[in-house]
Amino acid sequence: MAHTAEDRAAVERARIAIASGERVTEIRFTDRLVKYADPPTLAELNELLHAIDHDLAAKGKRRIPFSGRTWGCAQPGKGL
């Protein structure tokens, strides 16, 4: 399933709510509502955030072949 930035924001809001002591029984995503019988733990939500981040990174990643070059930047000046 493809995740969106809105899905990530919903999980992040639920994670913050649980961390502040609230009981979260559902998370509303863009196109669906997930209801939990038992509130999810922070570890479960962190795992879900990691999966969403991985999915979003894979979607937005540009495929550029590795050239093996190293780039640097120097700023001219007097020094110390």
Image (cartoon, rainbow, N blue to C red):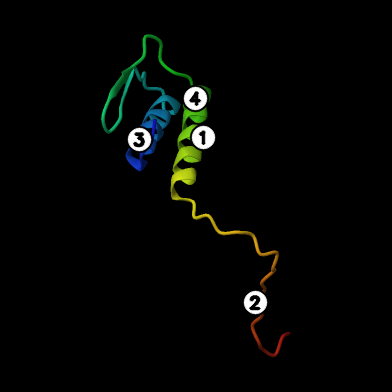
**Total marks in image:** 4
Q: CA distance from mark 3 to mark 1?
A: 12 Å
Residue displayed at 47% across by 28% down: 48
| Amino acid type for the residue under numbered disc 3 | Asp
Element class at badge 4: helix
2 vs 4, front mark: 2
Amino acid at the residue labelled 4: Leu
Q: Residue placed at 41% from the left, 23% from the top?
A: 21
Q: Which residue is mark 1?
A: 50
Distance from label 4 to label 3 (Cα)?
16 Å
Q: Earlier in the sequence, mark 1 or mark 2?
A: 1
Mark 4 / mark 3, whichever is N-terminal? 3
* Residue farthest along the right direction in this orientation: 80
- C-alpha span from label 1 to label 4: 12 Å
Residue 1, percent across and down? 39, 30
Q: Nearer the viewer, mark 1 or mark 4?
A: 1
Distance from the alpha carbon under mark 1 to that under mark 2: 33 Å
Q: Secondary structure at mark 3?
A: helix
- SS category of the residue bearing label 2: loop
Q: Which residue is mark 2?
A: 73
Q: Residues within 10 Å of mark 4 (few under 14, many from 20)?
A: some
Looking at the image, which residue sits at the far left?
31
